[in-house]
Amino acid sequence: MHLVGGGWAPDEPGLYDLFVAEAAARGRAVGRDVPRVGVLVVVADDSPSEEWRTGFPALIASGGRCEVVTTVVEAGDVFDTRVLSDVDGLVVGGGLTPAYLEAVAPLVDQVRLLVSDGLPYVGFSAGAAIAADRALLGGWLIGDVPVCPQDAAEDLDEVELGEGLGLVDLAVDVHAAQWGTLTRLVAATEAGMVRGGVAIDEHTALVVGEGALTVLGRGSVWRVEPQVDEQGDVVGVSVGSLGAE
């Protein structure tokens, strides 16, 4: 599973090489020479942009290494479960995180089953955030106290959680260094809203598999963990970083 903190450049497909290789292996197992990758996009007020909606799938398919099947819905609509049929890899894109969580609601059980069966998954920005058991949807206030820049609020005021896809058991925030969202995850952890998690920089992927966590790309993955006393109460938060080797 590949959790990407956002950010993209049309001439930098390398961040997705491992994902495409995993999809190719799954495709070969069913006799497919070129893997099929489903890309799911939810558009809210032209976010993600038209440039992203065309350029990002082309980045994944760079050099003809896979066939990309993109499905776009408007915010407020939901995906049909048929978008998961006959794909060797799945990408859930970026944009307004609450809109993505609403749109994937009919797919949750099937995505969990497919990923547990080895379907390669990329969550890009919003798609990374909703991969969690408890998805950090946005917001910039906790109890009316600012915890991150308002521009990163995802159209929410108070920090809000929702039931995510359940693919990872830690909270995920994105655009960490670029949008200042690490502090939101720190504050949510200290408030006991989440039991720690990761905040991922742009142009950076956290690869979660059966072994050790792997970081790919330019930036860092920030690990946030609660510090608890003997009674189990949160008394502080520790922050560390992981970078690409």
Image (spheres, grey):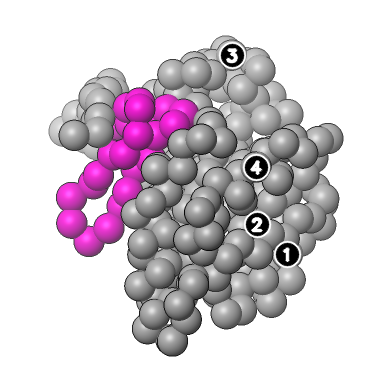
Q: Give how far apart the Cα atoms at labels 4 and 2 are.
A: 14 Å
Q: Is residue 219 magenta?
A: yes
| Mark 3 nearby-residue class (10 Å; few <14, some 14–19, many ≥20) | some
Q: Which residue is mark 4?
A: 55
Which amino acid does the dot numbered 1 rest on? Phe
Type of amino acid at the residue the image marks with label 4: Gly
Front one among 34 and 44: 34
Q: Is residue 228 above or below residue 37?
A: above
N-terminal of the pair, mark 1 or mark 4, is 4
- Seen at 37% across and 83% down, the residue is 29
Q: Quadrant of the N terminus?
A: bottom left
Label 2 vs label 1: CA separation? 8 Å
Circle on res. 205: none
Indicate the amino acid at tag 2.
Leu
Question: How packed is label 4: few (under 14 Cα within 10 Å), some, or many (20 or more)?
Answer: some
Q: Is residue 111 left or right of residue 150?
A: left
> At x 77% / y 44%, what residue is drawn?
43
Q: Which residue is mark 1?
A: 79
Q: Are marks 4 and 2 in contact (CB under 8 Å)?
A: no
Bounds of the magenta span? 197-224
| Left or right: 223 in relation to 133 | left
Residue beneath label 3, please?
A: 149
Q: Nearer the viewer, mark 1 or mark 4?
A: 4
The percent coordinates of residue 237 (x first, y second) are 29, 23
Nearest to the observer: residue 242 or residue 22:
22
Sequence-first tag of 3 and 1: 1
| Residue that appears at 61% across and 73% down | 84
Q: Which is more N-terminal, label 2 or label 4?
A: 2
Residue 188 % position (x, y): 45, 29
Labels 2 and 1: the sequence-earlier one: 2
